[in-house]
Structures are given as C-alpha cells and as structure tokens.
Image (cartoon, helix red, strand yellow):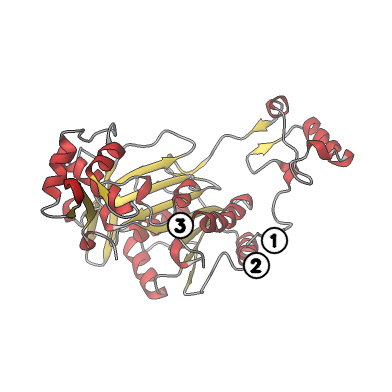
Amino acid sequence: MTPSPNPAFKKVEDIGRNHVPSPEVAEAIAQRRVQSEPQKELSPGVIPLSLEEMRKMDFDPPEFIVDQLFLKNGINAISGVPESHKSFLALDAAKSLALGMPFLGTFPAQQCKTLIIDEENSYGRVLARFDALTNEKLDIGVLCGGHIKIDEPGTVEKIIEYCHAHGFGTVIFDSLSSIHSADESSNSQMAKVFEYFIRLKQANLTVFFIHHEPKSSKSNPSHASLRGAGDIWAKCDTHISLRHPDKDVNTIIATQLKNRDAERLPEFVLAVHREDDRTWFEYIGVAPEQVGLDGRTDDAIIQLLATADGELYQGQIIEALLGAQGIGGKRKIPERLNALAKTKLDCRTAEHGRRYYSVKPEQLDG
C-alpha cells in the first residue's frame, strides 16, 4: 500500500534529509513548479535537478549515531541465527545511546532517546536483560506485544508523532518479520514495507531492526544471509551479522556486511561475560581467520544451495562460485562436494551420470 501524505515529513522542495539547497536554488525550484512545465516533470511536482544545480547545494556529510557501525537517520540491520545475542546486543546499543557512552566500550555513540518496539519478547524478559546489562537509570521507552504492523494505514504516522512528542530519536524493531503483513520472500512486497522505514528516516528518526538468518549462514555470513527477499538487504544502510564460532556461546563474531557511507570494518570478536545476574559484552579486537580453504569452500557451497530454487548440479555450482574470493576452484569444489555429500548434502544421480545436490533438511532453519 502507498504511504499517505503527512505534514510532518519534509516536502520534495527540501531535497531530502541531508540536502540543504542554497536560497537561490530553492527559489529556482519553486519558480519552476509555479511555472508548471509538464515536459520537464517526471510526475506532477517532481522535477530532476541538473548537476550544476546540485553543485550549488550544501550537503551535510553522513553522520553515524554509533561511530562506523550505525547510521544516524538510517536503516540499520542486526541479524544472526537463533541465540546469537542479536536482541541482547541491540539493547546494549540502546543503553549506550541513552548514556551517550561508547558502544562495547569502543565505538563512540551519540546520546539519544530510544523507543523499542518488541513483538517477540515480554516486558519481563526485556527488563531482565536491561537489568543484566546495567543498573543505571536509562531514558528508554519499551512497547511489547502491541501488535504493531508498520504497513497498516496510519501506524507509521502514529510512531512519528509519538517519537517527536516524547523526544525519541531512535526506534528499534524486534523483529522485522513480526511488524508487517507482507510476504517476506517477495521483493515487491518488502520494498513497500521499507517505504515505511524510509518515512521514519525522513522524519529524522534512526531505525534499527532485528532479523533472522538461516542456520546455513552461521559460519559464512553474506548479503544473502538475511532471511527473505533480497530487497531487505538492498534497503539497509548498515548491516551487522552475528554468529558464535564452533558453538562457543561465550564468543561472538560480528561481521559488518554493509555500510553505505564508510569503509566496512573488518570482522571483530566480542566476549560474552556472565557473573551472578550480570551480563556484558567486551570488544576483543579484529577476528582471526576462523576457517581454512576447505571450510570456506564448504560454507560457500552450502550457502549457495540453501538459497537456490531447487537442486543444482556440479557444473552449475562451479560456475556460480568460480572466482569468489577465498574459496577453492575447479578442483577444490568437486572435492568438497564429494565430502559434503557424506554429511550435509543430499546427492542424486540423474541420466548420463549427472549429480544433483541439495542441502539436507536438518541443515536448514525450519
């Protein structure tokens, strides 16, 4: 559905949240609209700018609400397989923003009031997690079980109005799949869902959402790790993927898979500490290489097959993966297919001896 107009949003003449035209350019744009030159319009009131007009404008540089990690007035994704601490880490980010203290003790954070819309956890669980993180007073709002669907008419307008009235600058949604009514595997439907997130951006709100990954991505995160349509990843400004190495629940590997406005950070390691009723995360540093060539090739094969529409035969797999950085080639891929067929892959031999592969059901996230 198409978002309804809202006077709280900047008009087209404002040229977006980071674009402030000079008075001369603003006046020229206004005059062109008054003069109504249909042949220069893409649609009523929508007129492309020339490069020279753009050069006369003042552009604010991108600003991070958490340095190098999360974009202010952006759409920021935190994803992971089940029990990878993604929700817990999002609460830790909200704590850092509330206090204006560095996230994970390492990444400077602006002070900002956060609203958490949680459709997966109870008030009691959210409170217990915050109490485990800190006993300090935090200016944070929480809504659990509100049956919020951002694609229902009027919902986004109400969120914007509430945030502006109560001074919230950041909204965390847990989880993405719980806050809309669209088919998550449909690019066209998810593009419409993200139009509502863009409305929040245009209203000068920073958006975080938590999303799930299939189990097959736990050792080889990529842009395809996000469950559902590819448009979910395409619409993000930043994306962090979390996983535990070798079932070590006290260690998290964080991979920044996307950052539109800065160079992506290398993978880094977090330690999870627990003592009595307290839990905290410690930044350890840049992650060492976790797996060798065989392991990286195995992960790439499994990820490809997990996201494929049906079986693939060996030649298709080689063609899809050949040249990918850090994995094997024409000799290594068939070797690893034979090894994986004994453990994680189903293999079917068709006519002329062609072998088709698919991921065993137990390897996929149900």
The residue beneath circle 3 is 209
Q: Are marks 2 and 1 in contact (CB under 8 Å)?
A: yes
Q: Quadrant of the N terminus?
A: bottom right
- What type is the residue that disc 2 sits on? Gly
**Distance CA(mark 2)–CA(mark 1):** 8 Å
- The residue shown at (22%, 60%) is 274
Q: Which is closer to the viewer, label 1 or label 3?
A: 1
Observer-nearest residue: 323 or 365?
323
The x and y percentages for residue 209 are 45, 57
- Left/right placement of residue 67 relative to residue 160 reads left
**Distance CA(mark 2)–CA(mark 3):** 20 Å
User: Looking at the image, which residue sits at the far front?
Assistant: 352
Asked if residue 236 can be seen in this view, the reply is yes
Q: Quadrant of the C terminus?
A: bottom left
Q: Secondary structure at mark 3?
A: strand
Up-down relation of residue 221 to residue 54 (above or below): below
Observer-nearest residue: 45 or 275?
45
**Distance CA(mark 1)–CA(mark 3):** 23 Å
